[in-house]
Image: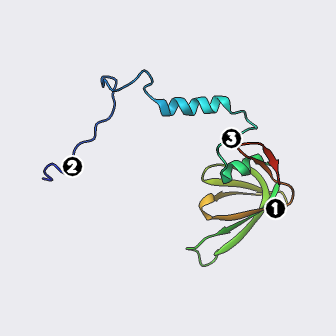
């Protein structure tokens, strides 16, 4: 139907001679990184928003969000304590109301802290 334009992809298998002694280097590197990283430290080369938020767990923040497709919640500020942060989400708790928020990072504009920020740079520990 499509002539020679499309070729079926080939994937490495156990019988493929192109496989080296390390059949899954990505998984092994990930596992090595997990083992080398303590609970209070982060991989030094990863300076991402979620990692900065993780370094500042327990701090009170104001997180500014924009929801472009919403008529009611175009811009919203969430105030609370940083509980957890993941690659795509932020969890805040508000001790004054007892509410907990699971927020998507894609809508996050910026975060204001009420105190100094802990920040881990690739060369040294910094506090701003």
The answer to which of marks 3 and 1 sits earlier in the sequence is 3
The answer to which of marks 3 and 2 sits earlier in the sequence is 2
Viewport quadrant of the C terminus:
bottom right
Helix, strand or loop at label 1? It is loop
Helix, strand or loop at label 3? It is loop
Q: Mark 2 and mark 1: span between their CA atoms?
A: 58 Å
Q: Callout 1: 10 Å neighbours few (<14), some, many (20+)?
A: few
* Along the line of sight, the residue nearer the viewer: 92 or 114: 114
Q: Residue at x 80, y 48 (%)?
A: 126
Q: Callout 3: 10 Å neighbours few (<14), some, many (20+)?
A: few
Which residue in the protein does label 2 denote?
6
Q: Mark 3 and mark 2: span between their CA atoms?
A: 42 Å
Which residue in the protein does label 1 denote?
97
Which residue in the protein does label 3 denote?
44
Helix, strand or loop at label 2? It is loop
Q: Which of labels 3 and 1 is toward the front?
A: 3
Q: Position of residue 51 (x, y in %)?
A: 69, 48
Q: Mark 3 and mark 1: span between their CA atoms?
A: 36 Å
Say whether marks 2 and 1 touch (CB < 8 Å): no
Q: Which of labels 2 and 1 is toward the front?
A: 2
For residue 33, side relative to residue 24 (left or right): right
Q: Callout 2: 10 Å neighbours few (<14), some, many (20+)?
A: few
């Amino acid at each position: 139907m499509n002539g020679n334009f499309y070729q079926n992809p080939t994937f490495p298998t156990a019988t493929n001679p192109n496989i080296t002694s390390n059949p899954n280097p990505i998984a092994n590197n990930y596992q090595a990184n997990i083992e080398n990283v303590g609970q209070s430290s982060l991989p030094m080369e990863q300076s991402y928003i979620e990692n900065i938020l993780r370094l500042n767990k327990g701090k009170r923040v104001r997180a500014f969000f924009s929801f472009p497709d919403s008529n009611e919640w175009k811009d919203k500020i969430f105030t609370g304590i940083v509980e957890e942060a993941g690659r795509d989400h932020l969890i805040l708790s508000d001790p004054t109301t007892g509410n907990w928020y699971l927020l998507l990072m894609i809508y996050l504009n910026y975060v204001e802290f009420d105190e100094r920020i802990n920040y881990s740079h690739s060369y040294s520990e910094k506090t701003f």
